[in-house]
Image (cartoon, coloured by chain):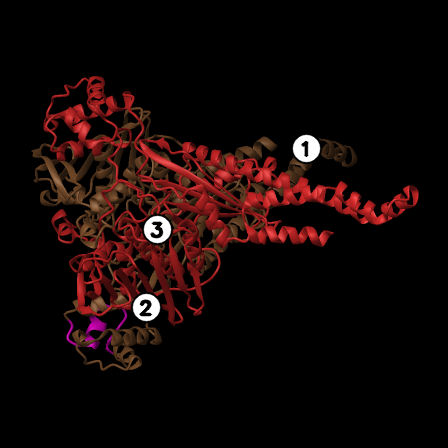
Chain colours: A red, B brown
Amino acid sequence: MQKTAEELAKKQREISIAEFFEKNRHLLGFDNPRKSLLTAVKEGVDNALDACEEARILPEINIEIIQLEETRFRLIMEDNGPGIIRKQIPKIFAKLLYGSKFHKLSQTRGQQGIGISAAVLYAQLTTGKPATIMSKTGNKQPAHQFKLKINTQTNEPDIMEDIEIKWDEKDHGTRIEMDLEGAYMKGRQSVDEYLKETAIINPHATIIYTNPEAQQTLFSRVTQELPQEAKEIQPHPYGVELGRLIKMMEMTEARSLQQFLCSEFSRVGPGTAKEICENAKLLPTMKPENITRDMAEALYKGIQATKIMAPPTDCLSPIGHDLIEKSLKKEINAEFYCAVSRPVFVYRGNPFQIEVGIAYGGDQPKDQLVTLLRFANRVPLLYQPGACAFTKSISSTSWKPYGLQQSQGSLPVGPVTFLLHIASVWVPFTSESKEAVTHYPEIIKDIKLALQEAGRKLQSYVNKKGRVQGQLERANLFERYIPEVADALARLTGEDKEKLTQKLQDMIKKEDIQRAIHQMSSLKGDVEAETKLAERAEDED
Amino acid sequence: MQKTAEELAKKQREISIAEFFEKNRHLLGFDNPRKSLLTAVKEGVDNALDACEEARILPEINIEIIQLEETRFRLIMEDNGPGIIRKQIPKIFAKLLYGSKFHKLSQTRGQQGIGISAAVLYAQLTTGKPATIMSKTGNKQPAHQFKLKINTQTNEPDIMEDIEIKWDEKDHGTRIEMDLEGAYMKGRQSVDEYLKETAIINPHATIIYTNPEAQQTLFSRVTQELPQEAKEIQPHPYGVELGRLIKMMEMTEARSLQQFLCSEFSRVGPGTAKEICENAKLLPTMKPENITRDMAEALYKGIQATKIMAPPTDCLSPIGHDLIEKSLKKEINAEFYCAVSRPVFVYRGNPFQIEVGIAYGGDQPKDQLVTLLRFANRVPLLYQPGACAFTKSISSTSWKPYGLQQSQGSLPVGPVTFLLHIASVWVPFTSESKEAVTHYPEIIKDIKLALQEAGRKLQSYVNKKGRVQGQLERANLFERYIPEVADALARLTGEDKEKLTQKLQDMIKKEDIQRAIHQMSSLKGDVEAETKLAERAEDED
């Protein structure tokens, strides 16, 4: 009956990472059919946008979803990116944990080299079909087409087809086609919503989307300028854990501790390096390979005890307040727009940047909770709003001074959409599937500062709107009595009634009000809304 | 400026699974210092219990946590399991995705072969120190001691020490020691709570725990019998996805479709296999290697269209209602205990078994929400109660008929602890770190049936308690007036007052009430509580 260690050992063996994720696909966002369809789209779009930006190409992305059966869909995604060289296509799409962004400290959407191959794995698991990939890297290059599956036992690509193909419409780009199990629904957490928000947060991208009902939506770019390139940075000493520090010393080619510190970290020059060594009671001339674990720990503590300049901020690529406003104007029918792009701040050695936009009024419902559009590194966050630092920051800010109703501790009520964006080389998500930002007090504090700044702009608009409306109402009231007053005055003074009417009309200074309206409109800079407001003013006449 | 596909390709490379989890440790439960300490303990205890049960050994586990610095702890875990043979020790502890349970369909705590090596990885990342493992496989065998780190670049063990060592106290067993960053707190989601609940749900285990405050707690086993062995089963046809079916046909050694179906699935005999083939319009004699994807899909649909017997249930190892009661009695000071072990039910080809226990009254607070102890495959679930099917099942059951207060849709209020256990070869967790059970309607339905059955037992106790208490109160009231009544009767009848008093006392049948109290006590079978109740009755005299 009693089994021995030898018998138990017979069954112990290695598990492939592909088998692991096949069994644990919820870890990668493939929890259920609806979320799986969204995740597959998301992985394709993230990759396309990242590749275009890295290659400095204005992205144009085509997404088409065709319903094949009740729970089966064909997903086609095509971009105008730099393309992928033939040799790399199988690994990029049919090997988990293969990519270019994993070891890089810069602001990118994808990170792990796992997303798109996980979608291929999910498709093959649910429909048994390979993914078809077509890619072209230049005008004079042929396009290559692969049909790929993942061998789950080895986590290596299984190449079912590898051909050259004519693809004349494009100079360069990549096209992915896969059949997968899914469920298509509209509303929050839908592909439609995801792409709309992606368009808002990527004002330089054009996205053409055909949904399973064959409705096509065009999200066209509002700027011809690519976002500032996010530079790759070295880690800042404050953000490195002890185990990582030890590993870095094992791997370094530097010959001295001082050289190691200067060459492998950002913001460490010879002076700072010496100071760190001093604080760690280690000689700067020591060879890194001779550093023991205990010395490494002393070095780690020495780093914390040394004042080091904050990391460079050009690893971030914020959107900017003007583009946020433009984007909001394009996708949300409101009457006032404003945005704030905060200065970079540093937490645990990592630079962060918070941006906030507000769209107020217009078609938005007045008696419901405000709408939140949350983003991290230009990617929409559709799940788990309740767990997110963005939601917490809004609900713990007092909105009454800014002209919105609010119950204690809850989101404000009013015709408002908030856009919230966090950019960083390291976004602290609450979990696996990057759905919500962790409640770090430092991050919440900076989000609240951004919200307050935007809130003041909103307040000045809401106040001004109230004031101008008051003036206009009084002017209209007076205007209505001008004939009677003019009549009475004409009889009293004997002057011409026409002239008197004119003078009275001059007195109510409607021009001033019109000017105020005009200022308000230019404040929001939106011609359409301006016209509307003017019309409204005329209606009230 | 514009980068080409060739330039981008230079950076594309493979990422090791250890690097991936080093960066994404929250996926494995190492989110923050507090949870990390708990997760490390959990992984060690799960492995020890699984190994003991597989080797049919009554587990005795020693856990010691020593605080070294403010945020650094030494964790020592020792078991009397079968031990691990020398050759396997490095891989089991210092290679992610290596184990014996991944491909097995049976009810085990661990599944992935990733837990304990993830703890080693986390320890090395936060303290730079290797883990020390000692293991002995038999009386006449030497013990082996390893100091191990994980090479994160290769996901292979880095052996820092490999020696034979004297370990006379034990015939066989394993001892793990590691230093890691952590935070120790009491209360819910603490190591203390985790071990207490582990002891409750594993009545055959003895756990000795020394916390960082050097307080020792002994959880001794309440049964000398090992749980029924959970048999390994083959997959049931209903539970296999299309992609998996295709892979199984690629890997099978069966020569015909019929043979494949009979040999690789549970509950498929030659007759059923033929029927499946008929429904799929495929010949049973076809060779599996000749099955195309489209044929595989036909086969998949054929399976769904065929009536197949439910899977065997000996892959499950329930605790049983008597042991649940015993366990609750040992750890929770209540006055009434009951438990229900439901019959096995099948969902998506997988057998499930639900068990529920109730501890009522005693020291538990009367005016707070009831306490929930949630378990899956004998492992306590401490996180995310709000997302769990167990919580939903209790709050959507109406508890007023069973004698508990309850607001609509919320947990009931009262001096009650609920124990809830789900056993399955495949527990549908809501996420990565196995914290909550998904809201499948089928599962919730069976949990509610178990709750109602236990609820009826609770109700009969609560009612009886009310009745007996009523009787006792009336008797006490009457008893108080016996002297006056006896006095009056003596004067009226001239009989002896003493005798009359005795007769009157006989009339109120206190013995009957005492008997009822005794019955109630035997109903709960707890001598201590019985004495208390009797004392209470006496106090009321």
For marks 1 and 3, give the CA distance.
49 Å
Dividing the picture into quarters, in which one does residue B34 lie? Answer: top left
User: What number is the disc on residue B238?
Assistant: 2
Query: Which residue in the protein does label 1 denote?
Result: B480
Closer-to-camera residue (A393/B379)? A393
The three-letter amino acid code for the residue at tag 1 is Arg
Chain label for disc 3: B
Q: Residue A185 at x, y = what percent? A: 45, 63
Dividing the picture into quarters, in which one does residue A282 lie? Answer: top left
| B481 w.r.t. A59: above or below | above
Chain label for disc 2: B
Is the residue marked by circle 2 packed among few (<14), some (14-19), or many (20+) residues within 10 Å? many
Closer-to-camera residue (B53/B478)? B53
The three-letter amino acid code for the residue at tag 3 is Ile
Query: Which residue in the protein does label 3 denote?
Result: B319
Which residue is found at the position 14% from the left and 70% from the top? Answer: B253
User: What number is the disc on residue A446?
Assistant: none
Residue A312 as seen in the image, left or right of residue B441: left
Mark sitting earlier along the chain (1/3)? 3
User: Which span of residues is magenta-colored?
Assistant: B254-270
The three-letter amino acid code for the residue at tag 2 is Tyr
Q: Residue B286 at x, y = what percent? A: 19, 79
Dividing the picture into quarters, in which one does residue B382 lie? Answer: top left
